Amino acid sequence: MKINLTDEIKKILLNSIEKNIRQGNFHIKDVPEIILLTPKNKTYGDLSTNIAMQLSRELRLKPLDIANFIVNDLDIQDTIIDKVKIAGPGFINLWLKENWLYQTLNEIREKGDDYGKVDLGKREKVQVEFVSVNPTGPLHVGHGKCAAVGDALCNILKAAGYEVEKEYYINDQGRQIDLLGQSVQARYNNLLGEKMEFPVDGYKGEYIVDIAKEVIDKFQDKYKGRDDQESREFFKEFTLRKILEGIKKDLKDFGVEFDVWFSERSLYEQNKLQEVMELLKQRGFLYKKEGAFWLKTTVFGDEKDRVVIRENDIPTYFASDIVYHQNKYQRGFDKVIDIWGADHHGYIKRMKAAIQALGYPEDFLEVLIVQFVTLIREGKEVGMSTRGGEFVTLRDLVREVGKDVARYFFLMRSYDSHTEFDLDVAKSQSMENPVYYIQYAYARICSIIKKAKESGIRIDKGEKVNLQLLNKEEEFELIKKLSSLKEVIKKVALTWKPHLLTTYLYDLASSFHRYYTVHRVITDDKELTKARLILIDCTRIVLFNTLKILGISAPERM
RNA sequence: GUCCCCGUAGCUCAAUAGGACAGAGCGACAGACUUCUAAUCUGUAGGUUGUGCGUUCGAUUCGCGCCGGGGACACCA
């Protein structure tokens, strides 16, 4: 395999720096990682590095002098580098030979679906747990945002060479679940004309009545007027299963499929709780006070210690989570990422404390907090209170705007800022809608390729096409965008910011639209036509691969 | 009261691990179809990055204080 372009350039720069060290110009031991960036302004070259400024502090020399030393000893003969210039406070700007761009096109043609994959993760095992909504009701739009972010992040990590597992943790036991069953049971009895008091904190949503009706359809009055152990159990299990099915379906329709659905109950079946408590006690982080067991989370920076086993012997939710995270560790993951809604952020400290109390490294667990979503319709906020019963479910949203648009809107902004989801923009099939803008670029390309085929233009697999004919400014622009995909994937995999990929996608579509307006692909010039067809086909491939990672479809016609 | 997130163009948001003149879209204004899809493209206007200090060659980015918005602070889940 060929050496990576950026690695090659870094090596050339490094050689010069090391030469200067040997000559006694630079007095340092270790050279920091050289960072190559693509300048915003093209008058600053194709690539640029700020290494001279980075070294300035340690060398106690002016950045400009350092840059001069480096450039003077730079050996760019027979390399991909065409020209070097020092600019501004000490940037070293590099211009590359045009050839590198054509190499990119060949690489895309060769790799196809695999273009964009990089080996950053080295098969490291990462688990991402997201959504994990209590199965007490349907998913709402906020959960959709978590789902979109988690799913996209997983896909990106996979593309970056990590081994990724997507997991959904099901809180299928506890008071909430009991309450859920009782709510349906009460509705069921009421529907059959039987008196039964609705639980005080019961679930009042319409979906509870629907489930009760379903029970009637299937079992008629079999459970009418009963309030024994068996009937309670029945309603609990039936409801739980119904709601979980609904959640699974909603997520599937949203394009999200999990590798593992992990049941909280299974932790207790294995009697792991005892074991973990024993371990924590041994390690000296568990103590008894006022009849309850507490974990010394304050040792690790939490504001107060937390109860794990209540006075009444019932373990808290936190206890389950500790056992659950131990289980994650024991499954052999190198890193575990939890994606939580903003209302759970207070839990981070105690969870990370628990990780450490168990004896695991603090950064074994990373938690991403996804901020809320506000729906806007006709310029006004749509109320979403769960209590009042009137809230917008993910299913409703997908039905209204479609899966592609919903996912894109959740992914186009940084997950840690509030999302303002404008339903009118999302529904408009116009230029206001970035999703259509991107998909339109893809459809346009497909349309051109189809037309070329129809007029008998063919390019065989191994055929050599003169790519040098691609020499227009818009063509260079476009190819540069195509070539930066791998850097973007790396960046996102390191920073966990999927929205950077969305931005990239939009930029790429934009470069193509501009190109399309200025130049014709299919012309009388056979050679040029072929070269341009290759260019747009490469664009198609990159658009496709990126859309796929984000979970958005790529329609060939619009 | 304590802790977390946010504050950037009229609006919604970006800004690559501290880098060059802070960028997009929408909205406003002015233009471009005899063309492979005008769901497109081009141009103009729009900013003391909430505020005051500090760190340094350099701060939207890091630190501290203040102002404003949101959220979290249970032997609830």
Image (tube, rainbow, N blue to C red):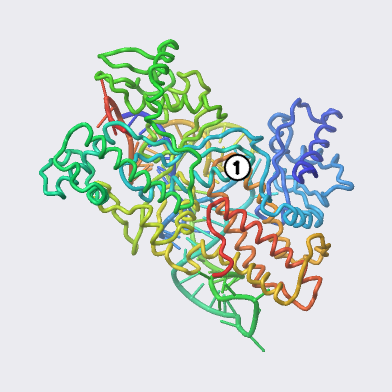
Of residues A171 and A499, which is closer to you in this image?
Answer: A171
* Percent of width and height locating residue A371: 41, 44
Q: Is residue A388 visible?
A: no
Q: Amino acid at mark 1?
A: Lys
Of residues A275 and A310, which is closer to you in this image?
Answer: A275
Q: For mark 1, give the secondary structure.
A: helix
Question: In the figure, is residue A417 to the left or right of A102?
Answer: left
- In the image, residue A545 sits, relative to residue A517, either above or below, namely above
Count of numbered tags: 1
Residue at image position (69%, 36%) is A54
| Chain bearing mark 1 | A
* Percent of width and height locating residue A271: 39, 21
Residue at image position (73%, 61%) is A476
Hey, which quadrant is residue A554 in on the image?
A: bottom right
Quarter of the picture holding the C terminus of chain A? bottom right
Question: In the figure, is residue B2 to the left or right of A223?
Answer: right
The residue that label 1 is drawn on is: A158
Quarter of the picture holding the N terminus of chain A? top right
Question: In the figure, is residue A529 to the left or right of A239?
Answer: right
Q: Residue furthest right?
A: A77
- In the image, residue A299 sits, relative to residue A338, either above or below, namely above
* Percent of width and height locating residue A290: 25, 14
Of residues A12 and A3, which is closer to you in this image?
Answer: A3
Question: In the figure, is residue A289 to the left or right of B41?
Answer: left
Hey, which quadrant is residue B2 in on the image?
A: top left
Residue at image position (37%, 32%) is A346
> Crowding at label 1, few (<14), some or many (≥20) Cα neighbours within 10 Å?
many
